[in-house]
Amino acid sequence: MTTPDFDLILVGGGLANGLIALRLKQARPALRLLMLESDVRPGGNHTWSFHDGDLDDAQHTWLAPLIGCRWPSHRVIFPQRTRQLRGGYASIFSAAFARAVEDALGADLWADTRVESVQPNRVTLADGRTLQAGAVIDGRGVDPNPHVALGYQAFLGQEVRLAHPHGLTQPILMDANVAQSDGYRFIYVLPFTADTLLIEDTHYVDGPQADEATLRDHVQAYARASGWTIDEVLREERGVLPITLAGDIDAFWRDADGQPRSGLRAGLFHPTTGYSLPHAVRLAEQIARLDDLSAPALFTAIRDTAQQEWRRQGYFRLLNRMLFLAGRAEQRWRVMQRFYGLPEPLIERFYAGRLTAADKLRIVVGKPPVPLGEAARAVQLTDPRQIVSRQSIHHCRNRP
């Protein structure tokens, strides 16, 4: 038997694998751990955010050194509703996250390293080298799969320095009082200092493509409409998050063929918001507690967790189908405007993914904000092939 080079190799240095690495270095410092990252630094170029209610007290404690900004409340804006919510909100910046991972791993982080192929116990690098491990976790982002139907949240944000103070004291998580077109659109604003902001243009759309030039123009237009003069664009981040509509989770994991996965690649994210940090925190804790870190044990543990989450999230996928498949695309904002009229504790439980039976009933009672017949048909669509076909028809119908 060949002795493995490492106990565990993490392929990809994104949020999920980064948190796994940090947690394992705390809990099991003797573990022979290696992270492989294709970019020059782990973490990419992101702002990861979460609500206070998404994590428990112990999770808040160990995540605290990574927090870049925290706010005690936040606001949402719609054409016929503006509301302030008391729930706290926090953000982690990828630059600080990268420093933490680099400090924790040292020489056990191989950045700027290209991976050719991944197997449960082996990684082949682009230069031909092969690395053996007790287990390999693949955390390289979404892997499109025919067994899962997705919508997408496409976004582009710019962190800007303004000529004068902006006057905001809390984040605006959704400002949907903007022009709507091929899907639900809103502006997301995080105030970092008195004169710096992240302004992000976000669209819930049927396909993963995004016109970055248009999104960039939207950010600039929003700043002008708000009376802000941009002195400097400090950085720009962009991405496309998956929003789950339906699928066969067992077939999804059969396709994984024993390969442990993490983060978005494992389907571990909030099905409606795309937020992945709470799931990544829980997965890191789960892996750090495991006695057996072999590939079969890791695969089984992660698969079982993802399947359990999927089955708990069926109601969210139902809501997603109504959002994406019922009514005209430019009217989808009405669904979210109605949702934000509900009691604040319910909204908090929604983001945390812990809706009660009463919550689920409360969300759907009353006059729906989309045509009833279309909503009923969307609810019944659970086959990914049907949804892909319906998305194509829906997109064509909504074109001007």
Image (cartoon, helix red, strand yellow):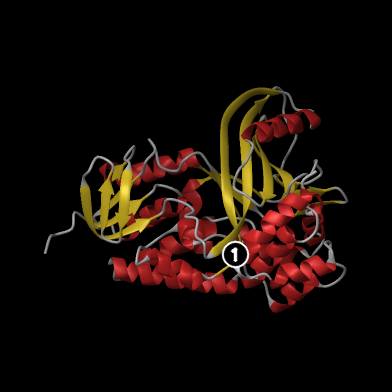
State left or right for residue 315 relative to residue 57: right
- Which residue carries the number 1 mark? 385
The image quadrant of residue 138 is bottom left
Question: Is residue 136 in view?
Answer: yes
Q: Nearer the viewer, residue 382 or 335?
A: 382
366 up-or-down from 275: above or below = below
State left or right for residue 32 relative to residue 395: left
State left or right for residue 243 relative to residue 7: right
**x, y percent for residue 308:** 51, 74
Instruction: Please tell me how many numbered marks the rendered image carries.
Output: 1
Q: Secondary structure at mark 1?
A: helix
Q: Could you classify mark 1 by the number of other residues whose Cα lies within 10 Å: few (under 14), some (14-19), or many (20 or more)? A: some
Q: Residue at x 57, y 28 (%)?
A: 234
**x, y percent for residue 34:** 28, 50
**x, y percent for residue 273:** 64, 56
Quadrant occupied by the N terminus? bottom left
Q: Residue at x 37, y 63 (%)?
A: 260
Quadrant occupied by the C terminus? top right
Tell me the amino acid under the disc marked 1. Answer: Arg
Q: Residue at x 80, y 31 (%)?
A: 225
29 up-or-down from 208: above or below = below
The image quadrant of residue 253 is bottom left
